[in-house]
Image: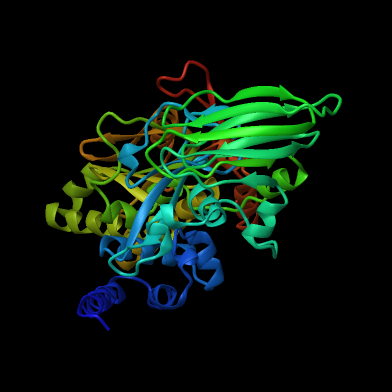
Amino acid sequence: MAPADAYFMSESEARFQVLRQSADTAAVAALEALVAQAPDSALNRINVIDFAHQHDLPLDSALGAFLHATRLGLFEMSWNILCPGCGGVLNSNATLKTVHQSDYACALCAAGYEPTLDEMVEVAFTVSPRVRKIAAHSPDTLSMWDYMRQIFWSSGIDFSDGKTIQDTMHDVVIDWVELAPGEKATMSLQLPAEFVIVFEPVTHSAQFLDVQGEPTRERQELAVVFNRVRAPTGTQTMRPGPLRLTLENRSDTRVLPALFRANHSLHGMLGRRKRFLTAKRLLTNQTFRDLFRADTLDIDQRLKITSLTFVFTDLKASTELYERVGDLAAYDLVKAHFGVLNEVVAAESGAVVKTIGDAVMASFPSPERGIAAVLRMREAMKTLNASHDREDLLLKIGIHEGPCLAVTLNDRLDYFGQTVNIASRVQGLALSQSIFATEPIVGHPEVAQMLAAAGLIPVPRRCSLRGISEDFTVYEIP
């Protein structure tokens, strides 16, 4: 073993030793085995949801291990913009700060999309080259098929149908070629009577060929140039028959143009989607917020989330509490209440966004996680009060779900928009130990099942909310 290899192995082992002290033991063991034994392709853009399922781990435990491992330099995190149409990676970012708000164009789909953190931004993990060098660290060395599988398509496409990537691509690719910078090639082929796409995944450019009409014996000519200029995808009408296709690479990197049949096999492959770790899911994780507090958004960034659940809590009559029991005792009680709420939020896959006085603002990836948290909060406060033989801590809770913007306020990740305002206003309506929820929450199927199982029947009330022009229906959960 070379001295440098021995050094990196000992360095990695030392980092895994630290990791064992901060993350779930089973998750760390699975990570160590992955790094030591898995093929290169399994260590590139790892889908944490898949990893947790394969190793029978709770998702939060697996995610926590990856986040701590990334902080220690064992893995690298990427924020990938995925096309909603084809699942291709439109842009890969080392940090969320470089994800911009404007449209991302997909040449293969001939469409533009504004990124949303819960639909288009995937977070994946790749082993650090200091820990283990894999082929994907040098994408220009990958074959056409491996490049498509590991770089262009990420962890959102399901290739577990028993076929190799080569077999899958042979069903949809007529021909392809590899071109070095400045290189030119000519293909002579027969165009089938179907829609064909000349697609190049490195520069993400495409030319549509609408092949229709009577077959011809005359040779048709087409020239396609690849460069770093993103141009709208054009369509060329052609006839079935012979084609001489000239391909020229004017970029500064290798390109991999291919002719794709837009057939059932291609659409079937692109339709096999699987769950991936979204940016929204990561931003609502307490471990991420604790470890990467300064590595989220730039001060001027505004990124959309189409659905996020917010919980606001506040202590009733906290001023009277300080007067009744004294500053020191009241401080200890309030501190204990914060500790309990933090534990509940983290246990339900949420994150504390901020505290304001005695109030807490928390976010959750979905309504059912939010409602599970608020029910546990209420019970936890009863337990905490019982331990002091008096009901000093009376918690008022409001919960709402909807779209928002992820922003940076006061040097930390925060959220902005009407959804946040409504959640705060709803909490302000709550009485002591009551939970006030909105229609999007109680109308959610999983929430309805949870409340029914607990024997809780939400009671509707028409209320006025400051800043909302019309009366608003809220539901009290007794």
Of residues 376 and 303, the one nearer the viewer is 303
Within the image, what quadrant is residue 20 found in?
bottom left
Could you tell whether 220 is left or right of 277 in the image?
right
- In the image as oriented, which residue stretches furthest toward the right? 214
Residue at 30% over, 66% down: 74
Q: Which color scheme did the rendering employ for the protein?
A: rainbow
Residue lying furthest front: 218
Give the answer, above or below, for where 28 lies relative to 360. Answer: below
In-image side of 19 versus 191 (left or right): left
Q: Where, by quadrant of the figure, is residue 195 drawn?
A: top right
Tell me what residue is drawn at x 78 percent, y 26 percent. Answer: 218
- Given residues 333 and 246, the one toward you in this image is 246
Give the residue displayed 86% in from the left and 25% down from the top: 214
Can you say which quadrant of the picture contains the N terminus?
A: bottom left
Q: Residue furthest bottom?
A: 1
Q: In this view of the protein, can residue 223 be seen by the observer?
A: yes
The x, y position of residue 107, in whole percent, is: 55, 32
Estimate the x, y position of residue 40 in percent, counting from the top left: 46, 67
User: Of 271 and 433, which appears nearest the observer?
Assistant: 271
Q: Position of residue 337 (x, y in %)?
A: 29, 56
User: Which quadrant of the figure has residue 10?
Assistant: bottom left
Residue at image point 47% right, 57% down: 142
Decide if residue 478 is in sight here. Answer: no
Tell me where residue 294 appears, x and y as whole percent: 23, 46
Specify whether 330 is left or right of 379. left
Whether residue 105 is situated above or below residue 290 in the rendered picture = above
Q: How many marks?
A: 0
Q: Nearer the viewer, residue 67 or 146?
A: 146
Q: Judge left or right: residue 244 versus residue 201.
A: right
